[in-house]
Image: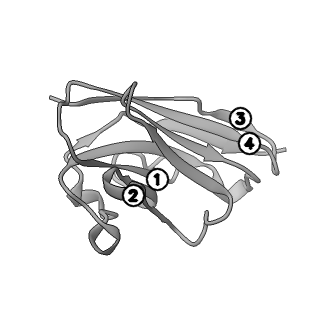
Amino acid sequence: QVQLVESGGGLAQPGGSLRLSCAASGFTFRNYAFGWFRAPIGRAREGPYTCISSFANINEVTYYADSVKGRFAISVDSTSDTSYLQMNDLKPEDTAVYFCAFVSGTYFHHNIPTRPGLFDFWGRGIQVTVSS
């Protein structure tokens, strides 16, 4: 059973930065993908969940939603089984509950998972608020 624990959320000012971490445990898969999703505050249980970034370890393929492209960066440290989402130039519209998700499998650029239903394991979510 894979367990995911997010950390690093909180309050940031517009234009500021935060780095979210997702510590994974309990998996031994050789190939996998991490995804970062967000849901409106107050709707964390029912969504909708929007994929903002995804990372597949084969060839380190990444995906970014247009809304965060150029501002957010996803990475994975395979030595610690931790995914990071570096969020720069934050905007008020980035305010949301952020979720980390994980799925095992071999993914490339053409099939990197971005839909919530494709991920098998999820963290509990962490709130990010961008406000002055």
- Residue under the point 39% across and 27% down: 79
Looking at the picture, which amino acid does disc 4 mark? Ser
Q: Which residue is mark 2?
A: 49
Q: Are marks 3 and 4 in contact (CB under 8 Å)?
A: no
Helix, strand or loop for disc 4: loop
Q: Are marks 3 and 1 in contact (CB under 8 Å)?
A: no
Mark 3 or 1 closer to N-term? 3
The quadrant in which residue 18 appears is top right
How many angstroms separate mark 4 from mark 1 (CA)? 19 Å
Q: Are marks 2 and 1 in contact (CB under 8 Å)?
A: yes
Q: Which residue is mark 3?
A: 11
Helix, strand or loop for disc 1: strand
Looking at the picture, which amino acid does disc 1 mark? Ala
Q: Which residue is mark 4?
A: 17
Helix, strand or loop for disc 2: loop
Mark 4 or 1 closer to N-term? 4
Q: Are marks 2 and 4 in contact (CB under 8 Å)?
A: no
Mark 2 or 1 closer to N-term? 1
Looking at the picture, which amino acid does disc 2 mark? Tyr
Q: Which residue is mark 1?
A: 39
Residue 31 at x, y percent in the picture: 22, 47
Q: Residue furthest left?
A: 1
Dot in front, 2 or 4: 4
Residue 1 at x, y percent in the picture: 14, 28
Looking at the picture, which amino acid does disc 3 mark? Leu
Dot in front, 3 or 4: 4
Residue 129 at x, y percent in the picture: 67, 42
Mark 3 or 4 closer to N-term? 3
Check the image and report above or below for 81 versus 68: above
